[in-house]
Image (spheres, rainbow, N blue to C red):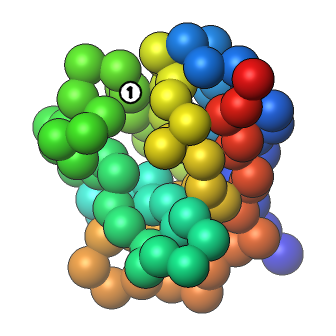
Amino acid sequence: QVQLVESGGGLVQPGGSLRLSCVASTSIFRFRTMGWYRQAPGKQRELVAHITSGGTTNYLNSVKGRFTISRDNAKNTVDLQMNSLKPEDTAVYYCNRVGENASWGPGTQVTVSS
């Protein structure tokens, strides 16, 4: 039973790119604003980017111009294209609906290191 499943993380050098993908259950995804969150070791989880069901996006200041969030309403997926990655982007990345979070998925680890 799919709830939230993230994929696409990995180890990348500074300046590199990754594309994260998330598939969500219809009950979580449909008509809801979806977001990508991240949690670095010893830090609180933070909302990195979010997208409304109509496609309006918003980003954390530190990732503006480098990250792009998108969604496919037919497939219940939300992606995060991450370019020009920095070591400070290292974290476990999660997707979830914004506001009333569903149960968290396993996340996907992103490590930016030379």
Question: Which residue is pictured at 60% across the width and 86% down the height?
Answer: 103
Q: Which residue lies furthest to the front in this view?
A: 114
Q: Is residue 99 left or right of residue 37?
A: left
Residue 42 location, x and y as percent? Answer: 56, 79
Residue 3 location, x and y as percent? Answer: 69, 73
Look at the image and tell me whether residue 50 can be seen: yes
Q: Is residue 81 left or right of residue 107?
A: left
Q: How many labels does the image show?
A: 1
Q: Is residue 81 left or right of residue 112?
A: left
Q: Which image quadrant: the N terminus?
A: bottom right
The crowd level at tag 1 (other Cα within 10 Å; few <14, some 14-19, many 20+) is many
31 to 2, vertically: above or below: above
Look at the image and tell me whether residue 23 can be seen: no
Q: Which image quadrant: the C terminus?
A: top right
Quadrant of residue 64 within the rendered picture: top left
Which residue is nearer to you in this view: 37 or 55? 37
Residue 97 location, x and y as percent? Answer: 40, 68
Question: Which residue is pictured at 81% across the width and 36% down the height?
Answer: 10
Question: Which residue is pictured at 55% across the width and 13% down the height?
Answer: 15
Quadrant of residue 34 within the rendered picture: bottom left
Q: What element carries label 1?
A: strand
Question: What amino acid type should be assigned to the residue bearing mark 1?
Answer: Phe
Question: Which residue is pictured at 45% across the width and 54% down the height?
Answer: 36
Residue 51 location, x and y as percent? Answer: 28, 45
| Residue holding disc 1 | 67
